[in-house]
Amino acid sequence: MPNRWFHEALDIAVWGKSYWSLHRRKDAAYRTLGPKHRAVGHGWYSRLNQDWTFDNPFPEMVLARTRQIRTSHGPDAAEKYQAAVTHDYFDALWDTFRRADRARVAECVRQLILDPNVLREWVGVDVMRGLVKRSRGLEHGLLFPVDAWEREPGLPRAYQHLRAYITNSPLTTLSDRFRESHPALARARLTISSRSVCRDGHFVRATLGGRAAKSSAPSVTFL
């Protein structure tokens, strides 16, 4: 399974906040069940090829549930639901990667998180000033969508904590060795396409460049 830092990194890139405690609870059973831990607390993961597929990971039933939660409990609760479902999606996607692909994808996400300029300019998350670019539209009484920078007080601290972990953990050694053995990866540019990234309780579709095993260059794509 992807390490918890991986899920948290995508949280920051997509929503501009960390759901570290959520991921910790979802993966708590790993201590006793090992790789079989997803039988507990991973409901969406278990519904693969029943309620969803990799081509349509967030079908209308998930969007409807998101809207329902947003109406009844507010945007923060809806966003937390999104993070939980996306956790399961990435776990299932991770299962399809070969070992080398997993290292490559982890390196892509690592590059993304370690570059505040990329986060600010490409995905609208300013980790240094604690600002997130959010879209406002019809649901806020606006005729046309408007993007605005909004303050996210816990973002700088969450980012620094994650950055320190990535920098000081064995992941760094793994990534360095992987780059040494794959010169093309060291030269590759991390590419991100950010389109219609809507936060504030509206579902965000996020994929790792489709199926990484078939991808020719490292990429992280948010659709």
Image (cartoon, helix red, strand yellow):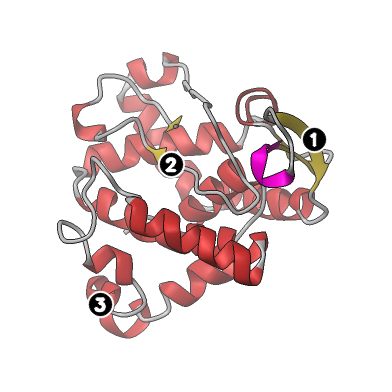
For the residue labelled by badge 2, is the local secondary structure a helix, a strand or a loop?
loop
CB contact under 8 Å: marks 2 and 3: no
Q: Nearer the viewer, mark 2 or mark 3?
A: 2
Q: Is residue 216 above or below residue 204?
A: above
Give the residue type at disc 2.
Arg
Residue 53 in view of the camera: yes
Q: Which residue is mark 2?
A: 205
CA distance separating discs 1 and 2: 21 Å
Q: Position of residue 170 (x, y in %)?
A: 47, 51
* Mark number displayed over residue 149: 1
For the residue labelled by badge 1, is the local secondary structure a helix, a strand or a loop?
strand
Q: Which residue is mark 3?
A: 39
CB contact under 8 Å: marks 3 and 1: no
Give the residue type at disc 1.
Trp
Give the residue type at disc 3.
Ala
- Front one among 167 and 33: 33
